[in-house]
Amino acid sequence: MEPRLFDLDFQLLHDALLTLIAVITLFFFASYFFFNPVREFLKKRQDRIKGEIEEASANKAEAEALKAEYEKKLASIDKEAEAILSEARKKAVANENSIVAKAKEEASGIIARANTEAELEKQKVADDVKKEMINVASALAERVIGEKMDTDVQDHLVEDTLKEIGDSTWLS
């Protein structure tokens, strides 16, 4: 037997070829049963993470939209509150004016009643003065004439006296 380089003989080549076939078979077997499930697991995980990122982006966009909407509502609430306060002020001013108008109306009514009462009192005093004048005139006439007068004569004398004097003279 001749010496060979690296001792390459048929048995070694055969063993190397069988080992290579076994390694390739083992690779495909491992790839099919181990690597493919791992790849599928990683692919599912990648898809899930991608979906969660997209969902988070959508949620963030929705949250920003809600934030903008709430800020807009807050601004409109401030405007609405100002409008409500303005309306309340207007109602208060109108109510105040109404109360003042009613008070003025009541005051003028009170003044009118007081004037009416004063006129009635004045009339009553005038009637009392007329009666007193009648009594005084009757008493004087009785003394002058010396006889008793009946009511018709008294009334006639008072009427004549009042016509001569005039209403304005004795009232003032």
Image (tube, rainbow, N blue to C red):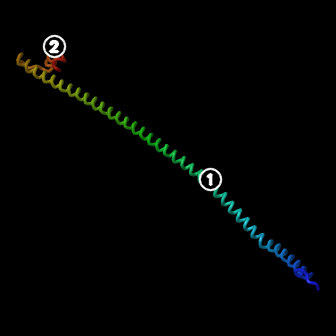
Please give left or right for residue 80 compared with residue 133 in the image: right
Q: In which quadrant of the rendered view does residue 5 lie?
A: bottom right
**Residue at image location 86% in from the left, 76% down from the top:** 20
The amino acid sitting under disc 1 is Ala
Residue 124, percent across and down? Answer: 19, 27
Query: Residue pushed farthest right?
Result: 1
Q: Which mark is residue 32?
A: none
The residue that mark 1 highlights is 61
**Residue at image location 91% in from the left, 81% down from the top:** 4
Residue nearest the viewer, comparing 130 with 77: 77
The amino acid sitting under disc 2 is Glu
Residue nearest the viewer, comparing 3 with 47: 3
Quarter of the image containing the N terminus?
bottom right
Q: Secondary structure at mark 1?
A: helix
Mark 2 or mark 1, which is nearer to you? 1
The residue that mark 2 highlights is 164
Give the vertical position of 29 relative to 131 (above or below): below
Q: How many marks?
A: 2
Residue 134, percent across and down? Answer: 13, 21
